Image (tube, helix red, strand yellow):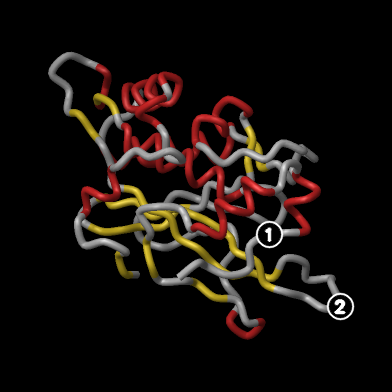
Amino acid sequence: MKLQYEDINRYLESSEIIDFHTSPEIAALSREIAARSKDKTDFAKNAFEYVRDEISHTNDIGGDVVTYKASEVLRERQGVCYAKSHLLAAILRCGGTIGGSVGGSAVKLPTGICYQALIWDDDDPHPYLVLHALNAVFIQDKWIRLDARGNKPGVDAQFSLEEEKLAFPVRPEKGETDFPTIYATPDENVIRALINNKNAQSLWSNLPRELKE
């Protein structure tokens, strides 16, 4: 993996999309998760599992709302993989106090966004690739990738420091790709797709297929 920016502080920034600086709800959630965590690793694990399990993937629940800002994802409690990666980045970048006690250690984890190119529908007679988003978190002096897309039959993403346990391991023989860059900001093509498609049915037909590079 390689970094979009060498300055690791870029992976702690708030923005219009990773908008914890203007969202009291994200700040409160981040503090709550930190308060019940025993260290940085536990904070990363708990935040990952919260977004994976408590925020629904829109397609899995038959939803029709398209969210893209982290605050929207938390408010609606649903989003596609891109949107869920924005929320996880916001929670981990915002941070809180481990254990919640006075004198406890403050934690903010540098968090980026990664992309894969995956086949949208294996049963399609003319399969094509679309982008999939996940996160990379800097912890214990290394970057690890986490996929909070949401588990379901056939998808079992887990927190792991040693061996990646992602939602969708790529299949190079089918043309799928892991893009090596850890981005500090979401890709422009992804954001454009989320903004321009006002409902999920429209988004499914217009998922981004390549990065804006």
Of discs 2 and 1, which sits in the foreground? 1
Q: Amino acid at mark 1?
A: Leu
Image spot of residue 150 (x, y percent): 61, 45
Q: Residue furthest right?
A: 125
Q: Amino acid at mark 2?
A: Pro
Which residue is depicted at the point 34% across and 48% down?
111
Which residue is depicted at the point 78% across and 58% down?
205
What secondary structure is found at the residue carrying circle 1?
loop
Q: Is residue 140 left or right of residue 87?
A: left
Residue that mark 1 sits on:
207
Mark 2, Cα crowd under 10 Å, few <14 / some 14-19 / many 20+, is few
| Residue 46 in view here | no
What secondary structure is found at the residue carrying circle 2?
loop
Residue that mark 2 sits on:
125
Image spot of residue 79 (x, y percent): 63, 40
Of callouts 2 and 1, which one flags the residue occurring earlier in the amino acid sequence?
A: 2
Q: Is residue 207 left or right of residue 163?
A: right
Image spot of residue 65 (x, y percent): 71, 36
Q: Is residue 59 left or right of residue 169?
A: right
In the displayed structure, 21 sits above or below 103; it is below
Instruction: Choose top left, top right, bottom left or bottom right for residue 164.
Output: bottom left
Which residue is depicted at the point 50% across and 59% down?
165
| Residue 43 in view here | yes
Position of the C terminus by quadrant: bottom left
